[in-house]
Amino acid sequence: MRKVWFRFILVGGLLVGGLLATQSVSAQQGKPPCAGVEHREFDFWLGEWDVSVVGTGQVAGKSSITSILDGCAILESYQTAGGYRGNSHNAYDRSTGQWHQTWVDNAGVVLKLDGGIEDGKMVLSGPGKDAQGHDIINRITWTPHADGTVQQTWTVSGDGGKTWKTAFDGMYRKRAG
């Protein structure tokens, strides 16, 4: 039987609640909690990558994509030669049946995206604001190619998804060595 407790603590004047479980249902059944095939759908993105701009081949940056938390999440660490850096946490959420990404960078951008596999591609999207504060939809698609590269295309819509504009189109190539 699964034992669950709620624990509340006072943090900076706020009452914060947390859920503590002694054992997950999966662990009780003898398999790791994130062993399902749905948890492996984004594994094609794991690795050490050089990232270039599609069409020009211009170097965009470097990205390290690693499996963390016993295979329950994927951590992305991206950086450019100019000092731009960002990280994302990606995980399959059993409760929603979707993948979730939270991206944060050193320019103050935060993206919260949800979605999943569509036609062999990982497609995540979510609401946001443009630089002028207008509502937009961000959509990022990761496409694995037979040669081992992964194309990441970030598109943005300001009209509720009727039209899309490319914000970034990058090609991930595994770093030598």
Image: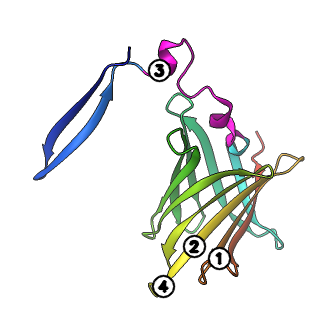
Q: Residue at x 10, y 53 (%)?
A: 13
- In the rendered structure, which amino acid carries the disc numbered 2? Ile
Is label 3 in a helix, a strand or a loop? helix
Magenta residues (range): 24-43
Hey, which quadrant is residue 30 in on the image? top right
Circle 4: is it few (<14), some (14-19), or many (20+) Cα within 10 Å? few
Residue under the point 54% across and 53% down: 101
Give the distance between the C-alpha atoms of the residues marked 1 and 3, in whole angstroms: 39 Å
Q: Quadrant of the N terminus?
A: top left
Q: Which residue is mark 1?
A: 161
Residue that numbered label 4 is attached to: 134
Q: Which residue is mark 3?
A: 25
Mark 2 and mark 1 in contact? Answer it, CB < 8 Å.
yes
- Name the disc covering residue 153, or none: none
Q: In front: mark 3 or mark 4?
A: 3
Of 115 and 59, nearer the camera is: 115
Marks 4 and 2 in Cβ contact (< 8 Å):
no
* Element under disc 4: loop
Q: Are marks 3 and 2 in contact (CB under 8 Å)?
A: no
The answer to which of marks 2 and 1 sits earlier in the sequence is 2
Q: Nearer the viewer, mark 1 or mark 4?
A: 1
Q: Position of residue 32 (x, y in %)?
A: 55, 20
Is the residue marked by circle 2 packed among few (<14), some (14-19), or many (20+) residues within 10 Å?
some
Residue type at mark 3?
A: Val
Which sits earlier in the primary sequence, circle 1 or circle 3? 3
- How far, Cα to Cα, is label 3 from label 2? 36 Å
Q: CA distance from mark 2 to mark 1?
A: 7 Å
Q: Secondary structure at mark 1?
A: loop
